[in-house]
Amino acid sequence: MNATARAGRRLGFALVAIAIGVGAVLGEGCGIATVYPVLDLPVRVGELDGDYLWPYGVHGGGHPEGHAGFDLFSTQERTVVASADGTITVRKESDGPGGEDVEIAVGGGLLVSIHHLTPRSGLAVGDQVKRGETIGHLTLIDGRYMIHFHVGMGVSKPCPAHFLKRSDLEALGSDADQPGTLMSLSSYNEKADEPKLCNSM
């Protein structure tokens, strides 16, 4: 690695540190750094129960291609909030068992999608929402309340864990072997083979 490359790498690390300090994560595509907002989980961790979480990349439950997001569950109707400041770009009926799809553009080309949401009254495309603002509620599907949460960058749907704030990520846990995390409490058929928060697609 030459001196110019080393200097660029040091600058990159410095930018990452600065970005994390101001509530953002840094990505890089085509050699150009992009700052993305750190995301809040759209349901408070302490309000998840029942089956808790169906993680990313699981090849089951009607997703042979891999599950491109998190399903979040509760035994009660819970509030769903905006994960970051942004603009509502989509509101439409969900494919499948119920609720609606809402998409929020949050900056840097990053889109936050909530499927099977029961939206709040009056929520409309073009609305500006703030981090933590109520956008709706979990939807009752097959005897449990739930939403599907994923992020999009163009045609890519990376694991949402890469964008979550540290406290939410630590509460979810990275695999089923960490006691006290939601991953250790979560119940899904494929858990023995795909136990991680972010499994391979």
Image: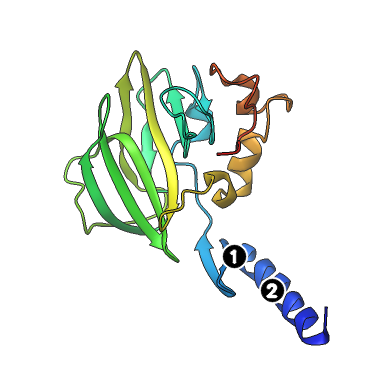
Q: Which mark is residue 26?
A: 1
**Could you tell me which residue is drawn at 22 percent across and 46 percent down?**
91
Going from N to C along the chain, the mark reached first, 1 or 2, is: 2
Residue 18, placed above or below residue 72: below
Left or right placement of residue 98 versus residue 6 in this view: left
Q: Which mark is residue 17?
A: none
Q: Amino acid at mark 1?
A: Leu
Give the Cα distance between marks 1 and 2: 9 Å
Q: Which residue is mark 2?
A: 12
Q: Position of residue 113 (x, y in %)?
A: 37, 46
Q: Position of residue 144 (x, y in %)?
A: 38, 17
Q: Are marks 1 and 2 in contact (CB under 8 Å)?
A: yes
Give the quarter of the image for residue 105. bottom left
**Could you tell me which residue is drawn at 34 percent across and 53 percent down?**
104
Left or right placement of residue 115 versus residue 33 in this view: left
Counting every numbered tag in the picture gives: 2
> Mark 1: which secondary structure?
strand
**Could you tell me which residue is drawn at 48 percent across and 24 percent down?**
60
